[in-house]
Image: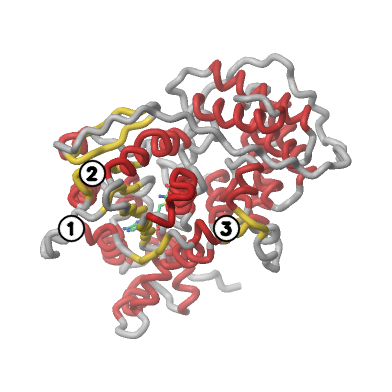
Amino acid sequence: MTRPPRSGPEVDPGFPALKARIIARTGHHYYADKDDLLFDRLRKRFRALGVADSTAYAACLDDRLTGGPEWAALEAEITISETFFFRYAEQFAALRSTILPALLAARAAERTLRVWSAGCSTGAEPYSIAILLHELLGSALPEWRVSILGTDISTAALETARAGIYGRWALRTLPPGERLRYFVPGPAVAGPGRDGTYALRPEFRRMVRFERRNLMDLLDVRAAPPMAEFDLILCRNVLIYFETEIVLGIVRGLGRRLTREGWLLIGHAEPNPAIAAMLEPVNLPGTVAYRPRGAVPTVVSPAPWVPAPMPDPEPSPGPAFAPAIAVPVPAEVGPSGAGIPIEPEADGTPGDLERIRLLADAGETAEAWRAVRGAIQAAPTDPVLHYYEGLLAHSLGREAEAERAWRGALYLDRAFVMAHYQLGLLMIGLGRRSDAARALDNAIRLAQALAPDAVVAEGDGLGPHELARSAALARAGVTGEGP
Ligand SMILES: C[S@@+](CC[C@H](N)C(=O)[O-])C[C@H]1O[C@@H](n2cnc3c(N)ncnc32)[C@H](O)[C@@H]1O
């Protein structure tokens, strides 16, 4: 039997040069010490083009005809597109109560507002801003010229963004009432894991336009001096992939594009003391925003946000499942420790959970679900795996299995705040109000018992305060009582 030829970064002489080109073009320093991971992604492109190694592949990238489309395919392959609606509730609370009201006041005379979501992935971020502005401006919206631009290096992500159609995975933190307000049922796409889509309502979709742009272009010193054109820039969860020098160059470039009254938001994990030397940090509850130095100070009294009442859920016949693990929701539980949301693992090994999330983010929900089931077989007492099993089952429209999985996670860790929260949202969707209220009460109590600066385990960056607030809002929709 002949053995397949060995392939890998260590036996591919053209790999170091190709890797250097990729990092220089995309800024993804993240791959500097992750040869295996990068090679894994490259291998898919080698296979697609039928080439044997990095040298042959580099020639395709240089080809006048195939080079452009191949760079686009490669960029889509190596970028991490994780995103979801209203990611980091504290930043959205700050946008709703402070930043956008301040901007609307500052722009009241000319009634124009320009927003840039830089590194917007599949569009959840700029569309969340569109929804917010739609709600804040209300009937005055037609009198304003609001422009929201979403840009990304990945043309594949932009294609999804333009379509505005999402699986439940991208909507996983939205209570059912908000899903109904912002989306209509989308086309059922053939194939496992792609049914039950949500289409963003056209009134939000038409507020955003998308363009391919590489953030590395902000470093181009030969370019014409930038125009201060944006009132608000979001560049979140992109800078983590770049090295410090590039981060600072990009932030400097973004800062130059802000108007005098402008605001910049970066991701939770991305602040750097050197950024504060370029732009003025402004502390807002649970987050930091940046403004141009000497920006016109704006005092806005935070207006409390009142959610629209939630439509009554469809009546449901009640639970039609037999839980694999019979788990009563505990009446009194104590808080569990905080965890770190999944971003790329530091050691570069795509661990089970990272792989599962990457698959889900890429829309391969059924494949991700199979992967999580496999991982559970190997580690049946890991509550986090059961939690993701629940999220994926829910994305696939398998509500009974989602319930069983989340109850399983809670059986293993009674203080798993996010499992209580998701279970509560699921119960709302199923019309099981008292189960919903019980699960959400548990989520609220546990979240309130965590340290204010803790990161909620598996909360995708949620802080305890914002989670308690989201759970209270969802619960208010169940009972009709105020949060
Ligand atoms: C993890 S997603 C973050 C999406 C969104 N901002 C959020 O926080 O939910 C990172 C996005 O940055 C994009 N990206 C990475 N490098 C980029 C570059 N050099 N220029 C523009 N976009 C880039 C990726 O394609 C990906 O869609």
Of the image marks 1 and 2, the number of the one nearer the N terminus: 1
Mark 1 to mark 2 CA distance (whole Å) = 24 Å
Q: Residues within 10 Å of mark 2 (few under 14, many from 20)?
A: some
The colour scheme used here is secondary structure
- Image quarter (top left, top right, bottom left or bottom right) of the C terminus: top right
Could you tell me residue 375's position as x and y percent? 65, 44
Res. 9 image quadrant: bottom left
Residue linked to disc 1: 227
Report ligand 1 position as a quadrant: bottom left
Residue linked to disc 3: 201
6 left or right of 427 in image: left
Could you tell me residue 217's position as x and y percent? 23, 61
- Mark in front: 1 vs 2: 1
Could you tell me residue 373's position as x and y percent? 70, 46
Residue linked to disc 2: 244
Q: Does the Cβ of the disc 1 residue fall within 8 Å of ligand 1?
A: no
Residue type indicated by callout 2 = Thr
- Mark in front: 3 vs 2: 3
Q: Is residue 482 above or below residue 194?
A: above
Q: Is residue 39 above or below residue 314?
A: below
Confirm or deny contact between disc 1 and disc 3 (CB under 8 A).
no
Q: Quick one: 59 or 240, which is closer to the camera? A: 240
Mark 1 to mark 3 CA distance (whole Å) = 32 Å
